Amino acid sequence: MKRIGIAGATGLVGETLLRVLESGPHKIEDLRLFASARSAGAKMEFRDREYEVREVNPDGFHGLDVAFFCLEADLAKKLVPLVADHCVVIDKSSEFRLRSDVPLVVPEVNPGALKSHMNIVANPNCTTIPLVVAVNPLHREFGLREIWLASYQSVSGAGRAAVEQLQYEAEFVTLRQKPDSKGSPLGPQIADNVIPHIADFDSHGHTGEEAKTIRESTKILGLPELKVNSTCVRVPVSVGHALAVTCRFSRPVKVKDAAHVLKRAPGIVLRTGKEYATPVDCRGNDSVFVSRVRQGAGTDELSMWVVADNLRKGAATNAVQIAELLES
Ligand SMILES: NC(=O)c1ccc[n+]([C@@H]2O[C@H](COP(=O)([O-])OP(=O)(O)OC[C@H]3O[C@@H](n4cnc5c(N)ncnc54)[C@H](OP(=O)(O)O)[C@@H]3O)[C@@H](O)[C@H]2O)c1
């Protein structure tokens, strides 16, 4: 991974990707940063050097080993296939995730899926990634039958404009005034509020985010019959997604046996007893934090609390891990 391109380098995920790469062992000889025409000419720092941002253009990726795409799905749809003629593309948008010819990869869970790639690899949704990292080791041991998920998702999951919207609204709320939320990327007011609506509703009443967590997790786990019930909620937190997860298994499971499995599982930090993790604890960290593991309503059910930094393990770190796997 010596020659790297980042499309969407000026966004939250692109910037986080730069920081993840910066602190890693990779000797990067060619780094090309791309964004919209608005950012062309801007400078970004990487390991004490300044790099100029260029307007994204498929020809700009010629000669690279890997391109990280951190753009919205409509742009990815147009540009990723063109860039994939030049190099491997790891795409963070939702555009290619469910395509049967595109592997959707979480390295701790389904690294083998990478073998079939045809120069496009999809990075899953920022809620799906911590979910599958946490449930996969339990599935391997106890056989997963059903998941109930409620997410508490930070505003950074919706990009930089959403973080700015929360900051703006929070100032009004502090002054006991009503903020203007017209045109907010999050829909209704988010400060002092929670919103059970992330992306559009379908005809069954599911939101787009809920559909992603359901379809992506069954694809990654290789369990098309798995039942997943999902409610995704936006909360007024800047970074860090939290998930309340209950799983039903094909046989009875004891909390101590689940803890034994989770403690040894890759990518997981387990907190036991009365210790738990919050979004503040996971910020800047690449692990998935699992805590409050407890018996569910039945002997074959377990509930737990899962937290991860959506910009790192939920996006940038996972993509870098995919690139590292491709190299190995
Ligand atoms: N945020 C998360 O937690 C997260 C997690 C997983 C996946 N994702 C996905 O990752 C992608 C990026 O998300 P983000 O949170 O980084 O968004 P963001 O902060 O809004 O950044 C968007 C990036 O896209 C660029 N862009 C916008 N319009 C463009 C255009 N017409 N041509 C070229 N570049 C353009 C922006 O460049 P300018 O600065 O020049 O406008 C910026 O670099 C999205 O598909 C998102 O769904 C996000």
Image (cartoon, rainbow, N blue to C red):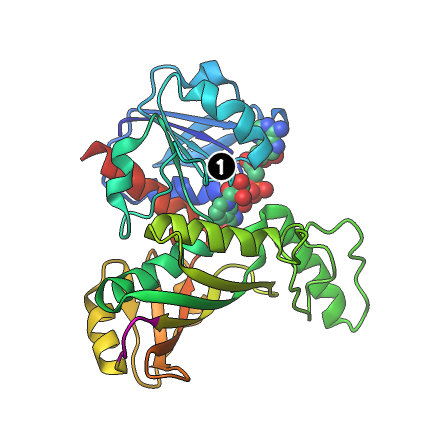
Name which quarter of the figure residue 153 lies in.
bottom right
Where's residue 235, x and y in %? 60, 65
Q: Nearer the viewer, residue 225 or 179?
A: 225
Above/below status of 273 relative to 230 = below
Q: Residue at x 33, y 50 (%)?
A: 222
Where's residue 88, x and y in %? 34, 26
- Does residue 53 appear in this view? no
Above/below status of 261 relative to 202 = below
- State the SS at label 1: loop
Residue under numbered circle 1: 70
Quadrant placement of the C terminus: top left
Location of ligand 1 given as a quarter of the image: top right
Q: Residue at x 43, y 67 (%)?
A: 147
Q: Which residues are magenta?
A: 249-253
Q: Nearer the viewer, residue 258 or 20?
A: 258
- Does residue 75 appear in this view? yes
Tell me: 255 left or right of 127: left
Q: Nearer the viewer, residue 43 or 294?
A: 294
Residue 22 belongs to magenta span: no
Name which quarter of the figure residue 252 lies in.
bottom left
Task: Count the labels in the image.
Answer: 1
Q: Residue at x 51, y 59 (%)?
A: 239
Quadrant placement of the N terminus: top left
Tell me: 322 left or right of 284: left
> Is the CB of the residue bearing disc 1 within 8 angstroms of ligand 1?
yes
Where's residue 46, x and y in %? 38, 35
Q: Amino acid at mark 1?
A: Cys
Where's residue 139, x and y in %? 28, 64
Q: Residues within 10 Å of mark 1 (few under 14, many from 20)?
A: many
Q: Main secondary structure of the magenta part?
A: loop
